Amino acid sequence: MNDSEMIVAYHPPLGQGKAHRPEAPLKLRQIWALRTRREMAGKAQESALFNLAIDSKLRGCGLVQLRVDHVARGGEVLTRASVVQQKTREPVRFELTEPTRIAVSAWIAKAGPTSGSYLFPSRQPGAARHFFLGGGLGDGCHRALGHGVDAERPRSGYP
């Protein structure tokens, strides 16, 4: 077979011809649906991580670098917290709502992190958990809301 007999299929690049716009924020009823589903499933870590993300509006990298001292003192979860944002080096102050305090205290009771350690530790000792946008919490949110993951979120061209 020579080069003139080869047939090559053309695949347009991913996302070509589609409007690129930011995703719409979650509605209040969607947030509460996700909160209750995580609580009912008994997923303490996911529940605490999701609730802290909603309350703090921190980026993922800042969220997983929270330490126990930032949100709890003396075995009690604080009502207000302040952390320095990694990207901007600006202090971020946020209030922890009642569902968040309950979820964080349940996670602390289950995982048993010590004072000064990361709230969401990595599998490697002494390291913070890595945050990867392409998997985990985001996919579960879209599936829990009844959306197809591929239909709702644009995917990167990487396998």
Image: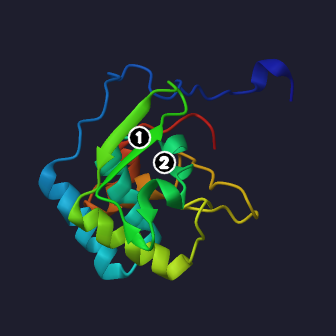
Q: Position of residue 9 (x, y in %)?
A: 61, 29
**Colour scheme of this structure image?**
rainbow
The location of residue 10, given as percent across then percent down, is: 58, 25
Q: Position of residue 91 (x, y in %)?
A: 43, 32
At x 67%, y 61%, the residue is 122
Q: Quadrant of residue 11?
A: top right
Query: What numbered label is drawn on residue 143?
Result: none
The mark tally for this picture is 2
For marks 1 and 2 on the same chain, the one whose residue lies earlier in the sequence? 1
Instruction: Give the quarter of the image for residue 156.
Output: top right
Whether residue 47 is visible: no
Residue 153 at least partly seen = yes
| Residue at 42% from the left image edge and 58% from the top image edge | 71
User: Is 111 positioned to the left or the right of 149 in the image?
Assistant: right
Q: Residue at x 63, y 51 (%)?
A: 130
Q: Nearer the viewer, residue 130 or 143?
A: 130
60 shown above or below 143: above
Q: Secondary structure at mark 1?
A: loop
* Residue at left offset 19%, top offset 56%: 30
Spatial separation of the CA atoms under disc 1 and disc 2: 6 Å
Disc 2 crowd rating (10 Å Cα; few below 14, some 14-19, many 20+) is many
- Relative depth, front residue between 123 and 56: 56
Residue 39 lies, in percent from the top left, at: 31, 76
Amino acid type at circle 1 is Leu
**Label 2 near label 1: C-beta < 8 Å?**
yes
The residue that label 2 is drawn on is 63
Which of the labelled discs sits on residue 58, or is there none?
1
Q: Is residue 108 left or right of residue 55?
A: right
Under circle 2, the secondary element is helix
Q: Is residue 128 above or below residue 106?
A: above
* Quarter containing the N terminus: top right
Q: Amino acid at mark 2?
A: Leu
